[in-house]
Each structure stands twice: as structure tokens, then as C-alpha cells.
């Protein structure tokens, strides 16, 4: 499970109006994340969070570093509210 804590990230520092047109994350989502993380950890799946960095940026960085290290990323599943994740697909990172 990859992601960042809900809240500000580095883009908010660079662009104060970043995501200003979006409604805040519903409390039910924020509260549910703690249970999701606990469930994922209970299954011995690593949780990677980078403070101030969004989940798709973490996923993209890991995917591209894997390609650079010689691995082929054959399946990358992204659940995004936008299409930003499609920027991740390159010759070594396939849909």
C-alpha cells in the first residue's frame, strides 16, 4: 500500500492554489484509511508513506526506479481521481 498522509504536500508550497477547486477529502475516507492500513499490515504487505508526497508520485517513482534497475513493471494498477497516473506508462512500465 502506497501513499501519503491526507493533507498538504510539496505542490501546495509551490502552488498555493493547488487543488483549491476540489472539495476536502470526506471524513469517512480519512477515518477508513487507518483500518485499511491495519488490514494491509496484518497481511504482511508493506505500507510505504512519504510525508508531503502524493501516492501516485510514490508509485511512479518506485516504478521508474524499478525499470532503471532492470526490472520490467508489467502490471501497475492505479486508483486515481484524475488521469495523472497515465503519465507513468513508459516502455518499461506497461498497462
Image: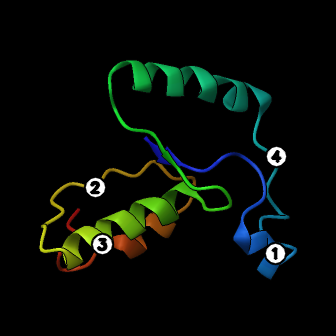
What residue is shown with label 2? 76
Quadrant hosting residue 11 = bottom right
Q: Are marks 2 and 1 in contact (CB under 8 Å)?
A: no
What residue is shown with label 1? 13
Can residue 61 be seen at all in this image of the molecule? Answer: yes
Q: CA distance from mark 3 to mark 4?
A: 32 Å
Quadrant hosting residue 25 = top right
Residue 39: horizontal and vertical position, in percent?
A: 45, 19
Q: CA distance from mark 1 to mark 4?
A: 18 Å
Residue at the image position 20 percent from the left and 54 percent from the top? 75
Which badge, 3 or 1, comes first in the chain's sequence? Answer: 1
Q: Secondary structure at mark 2?
A: loop
Which badge, 2 or 3, comes first in the chain's sequence? Answer: 3
Q: Quick one: label 2, few (<14), some, or many (20+) residues within 10 Å?
A: some
Residue 64: horizontal and vertical position, in percent?
A: 31, 73
Residue at the image position 78 percent from the left and 58 percent from the top? 8
Q: Secondary structure at mark 1?
A: helix
Mark in the foreground, 2 or 1: 1
Q: Are marks 2 and 4 in contact (CB under 8 Å)?
A: no
Which badge, 2 or 1, comes first in the chain's sequence? Answer: 1
Instruction: Answer above or below: position of 41 versus 49.
Output: above
What residue is shown with label 3? 65
Q: Nearer the viewer, residue 72 or 86?
A: 72
Q: Quarter of the image for the N terminus: give it.
A: top left
Q: Quick one: label 1, few (<14), some, or many (20+) residues within 10 Å?
A: few
Amino acid at each position: 500500500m502506497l501513499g501519503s498522509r491526507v493533507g498538504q504536500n510539496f505542490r501546495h508550497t509551490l502552488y498555493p492554489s493547488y487543488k483549491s477547486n476540489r472539495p476536502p477529502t470526506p471524513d469517512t475516507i480519512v477515518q477508513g484509511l487507518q483500518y485499511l492500513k491495519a488490514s494491509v499490515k496484518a497481511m504482511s504487505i508493506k505500507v510505504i508513506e512519504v510525508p508531503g508526497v502524493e501516492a501516485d508520485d510514490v508509485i511512479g517513482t518506485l516504478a521508474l526506479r524499478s525499470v532503471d534497475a532492470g526490472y520490467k513493471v508489467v502490471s501497475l494498477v492505479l486508483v486515481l481521481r484524475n488521469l495523472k497516473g497515465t503519465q507513468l506508462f513508459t516502455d518499461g512500465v506497461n498497462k
